[in-house]
Structures are given as C-alpha cells and as structure tokens.
Image: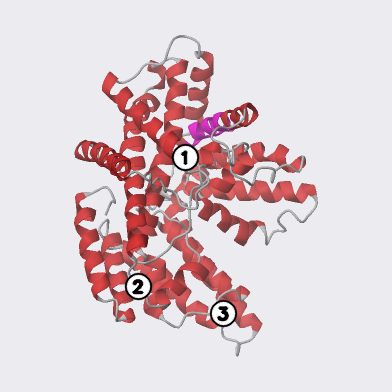
Amino acid sequence: MLFNSIEFIIFLPITFLIYWLLRRQLRWQNAFVVAASYLFYGWWDWRFLLLIAFTSLCSFFSGLVIGNPNLSPTRRRWALWGNILVNLLILCLFKYYDFFAQSFADAFLHGHADGLLLHLVLPVGISFYTFQALSYSIDVHRGSLAPSRNLVAFLAYVSFFPQLVAGPIERATSLLPQFEQPRRFSYPLAADGLRQMLWGFFKKMVVADSCALYVDQIFAHPDWFNGATLLLAAVLFTLQIYGDFSGYSDIAIGCAKLFGIRLRRNFNVPYFSRDIAEFWRRWHISLTTWFRDYIYIPMGGSRVPKGRVVLNTFVIFLVSGLWHGANWTFVAWGAYHALLFLPLILLGRNRRHTDVVATGRPLPTLLELGQMLLTFFLVVMGWVLFRADSIQQASHYYSLMFGHLFDGAPTTTGPLDAWVIAVAVFILVVVEWRNRAQEHEFYLRPRSRWLRWGFYVVLIFMIGAYMVTNEMPFIYFQF
C-alpha cells in the first residue's frame, strides 16, 4: 500500500479511529497495530508476511536467550550470532543471491547463468525491518536493553506500518518502550504530525514526481541531449531522490505522531552541507548511525591508527552502497563517497562542521555558499552512479555530459513542467532554509493565521493536482 494512494487515504482514518477507541486496553491496541501493519504490508503480496513474521519471532525468542543471566555467556553469544546469521542469510538470499550468481557467471561462464538464478521477488522493505530486528538483538546482548517479554509489543515494534517499508530504521531502545507503555492522544502532537505529513506529500508528489518525469526521459536516452541538459537532469535527480526519500520519512514520522509515537529524524537539510562529512551526518541519519554504532565503532572507529580508520571508512561506505541495492553501481557509489571522505579523515577535518550553516544569520557567507555549492556538485556527480543501470551507462553519461557541456542551453520537456518544477523547488529551498535550525523537519508556522492557512492551501492544491495524474512508487521501496 502506497502512502500516495487512494487505499491509504481510506486506510489511515479508519486505523486512527479504531486505534484510539482501544486506548484503554494497551494489549488490544498493540494487537490492532500489528494487524493493521500486516494488512498494510501484505497489500503488496501476502507471502511477504511470512518473512517479516519469521524475522520478528526469531529476534524475539533469541532476545530471551541472549538476555537470560542464568545461561552461560557462550550460549548467549551463540543465540546472538545465530539470529544475526539467520536474518542476514534471508536478506542475502532474496536481495543478493541472483546478483552474485550473475556476476560469477559473467566472470567465469561467459554470462550463462541458466540454472543458477532463483528469480526471487525482493520483499518490500526487507533491508529496513531486518536491520531494525538485528539492532534489538545486539542491544540486548550489549546490555543496553532488557529483553522484551511482550510478544505483541515486539511485533508492533518491528512491523509498525508508517516506517515499515522505508524507515526511519528505529532502535528498540527508543521505539519498543513506546509500545510497552500506555499512550494518550495529544492534539498538538497530532496537528504537528499532519503538518509534517503535508510537507512530506508535497516533497514526494510535487517535487520528486515532477522531477522524475524529466529525469526518466533524459536518463533513458542520454544520446539525444546536450551536456547542459544531462547536467540539469542529474541535478533534478538529486532533488528527486531527496524529495522522494525525505518525503517518505516526513510522512512516516508525521503519521506516527497521529498514533502518539515519536520516530527519529532521518534527514536534516543535507544539501546545505559544507563538506561531504556533514552531508552524511544529515542524509539518511538512521542508516548512517546504524552502520556507525554496529559496524564502524566495533571495528575500532576513529580510535585506531589512520590507516585503520581509512580501512574502516571504506568498509562502511562499501557496505552502505551494497545495502542500497544488488548492483555494482551502488558499490561504486559507496566507493566514490569513501574517496571524497578520505582527505577529510587524513587532515582531521571530518568533524569540522557539526553546527547548522549560517546559525543566527539569514544568509550564508560567500565562503559557506561556495562550500555548499561544491559539496552539492560532488553529491550530484555521485547520484549519476546511483541512478545508472550499470557502470558502463554511468561512464557513458559522464562522457556525454562533460564532453558536450557547452553545446547549448538545457532543453525542457515543456513550459508547464518547467514552471511546476521551478516553483516546487523554490518552495522547497525556502522552507528548508527557513527551518534548517528547527528540531523538527517541518515547522513553518507563521504567526499570521491567514498566511499559515494560505500556505497550507497552496500545498494541498499542488498535491491534489499531481495526485490525479501521477502515482509513483517511492524510490527506496526497492531497497
């Protein structure tokens, strides 16, 4: 079930009403969350429910063993690594087996992979809920969290529908206790959630989807266009993937607030970053911190010699690239960002920008503007790799773009599309810059009621206009 679908518009208010009618019975309320979440997830394919249920049950019961002080440390470690191995095997089987089998065939069998491939359908969101379940087992083993004995609450934690298929990737230390305690309806929290959902729908259905119409055409036939057009398409894909993914996160976080649940922030104005390290502190925060806490720091983090720090950094970025998809383009994308990160590590400048740009000032300095533009350009170049179907296609795109950059002005698909994109991007940049120092993703609440509601009406009008003509899936559903 897509957020930007008629089914979800019907599903959400019904779920909301029944959920709060059960507010005095926590166990039944949580059971309803599980049922609604399984309906939401099974809308794509009911067979996916078997996997998420199996993942949840494995993690729950292994947690009881891992957190049992009466068992020996060896048995508890076996339970931890057994659960990690089972979950990763499932993830690798569905997501990576065919990719590595085809790569093996290309290298040693002249591309003949007949009999090797399984052609399994990739379950939606498997990378997200698998990592969420794994973090629970690891946190219990570390002693950061007591093992849950409430199966219904645990199933709700793993399957909570707003963030189930594309994050944020929640930690059990934050989300699970919210399902184990009674929740009260809060009008201010719900109103804030609706505002955030509205902003998320705008970013997805107006910014991302309008950019997608242009981007898909250019990337499908790059030979038809000049270099300036290819560069513009790369920039628009940069805006598309941000509007698409951060829009999903906004909708998920806002939707959770309607149910009295707080999810972590997943994006913090990443395109206003002054270097690549700051970008990664602000982009897909839940995944970045997951890799930091469960892989990078256990490998030694930055408290090891420089050579080891460099190795650790490359491992994290390569794994992050592979997490995004079973394609060498994602691995290359991860390696590209690792190379950009390398000078900052060697010079000890990777923690230089931990504040918000232009703090206390309405505009950045010329230096900050230059840093942001350079970082944005480097990110744009990386997104070409991410968007391409193969390394060869990405190389061809780069060669056409830079080889014909000054052959003419960029072309557009039509005056209406260009106008919509320009207005949508302008609104996005102004609002995000205005809210860059706010705790929440969307906090635009002018004192004037007329101005505030006028802005909401504009957003609703633009969303409605595009909802009729476009219903595009979210990009990160494939991961």
Asked if residue 376 is among those painted magenta in the image, a careful observer would answer: yes
Q: Amino acid at mark 3?
A: Ile
Label 1 packing within 10 angstroms: few (<14), some (14-19), many (20+): some
208, above or below 115, in the image: above
Q: Amino acid at mark 2?
A: Arg
- Return the residue at label 1: 434
Label 1 element class: helix
x 29%, y 51%: residue? 3
Can you give x and y, in whole percent of width and height, for residue 216 in the image?
A: 35, 30
Label 3 packing within 10 angstroms: few (<14), some (14-19), many (20+): many
- Which residue appears farthest toward the right when viewing the image? 305
Range drawn in magenta: 375-386
Label 2 packing within 10 angstroms: few (<14), some (14-19), many (20+): few
Residue 124 visible in rendering:
no
Work out how far the residue at label 1 is from the one at label 2, CA to CA, in angstroms. Answer: 31 Å
x 65%, y 82%: residue? 73
- Given contact means CB atoms under 8 Å apart, are the residues at marks 1 and 2 in contact? no
x 72%, y 58%: residue? 300
Can you give x and y, in whole percent of width and height, for residue 420 in the image?
A: 31, 28
- Return the residue at label 3: 66
Horizontal side, residue 79 vs residue 477: left or right: right
Can you give x and y, in whole percent of width and height, for residue 134 in the image?
A: 51, 66
- Dot in front, 3 or 1: 1
Q: Nearer the viewer, residue 419 or 286?
A: 419
In this picture the colour scheme is secondary structure
Q: Nearer the viewer, residue 148 or 82?
A: 148
Horizontal side, residue 65 vs residue 160: left or right: right
Label 2 element class: loop
- Which residue appears farthest toward the front when viewing the image? 448
- Given contact means CB atoms under 8 Å apart, are the residues at marks 3 and 1 in contact? no
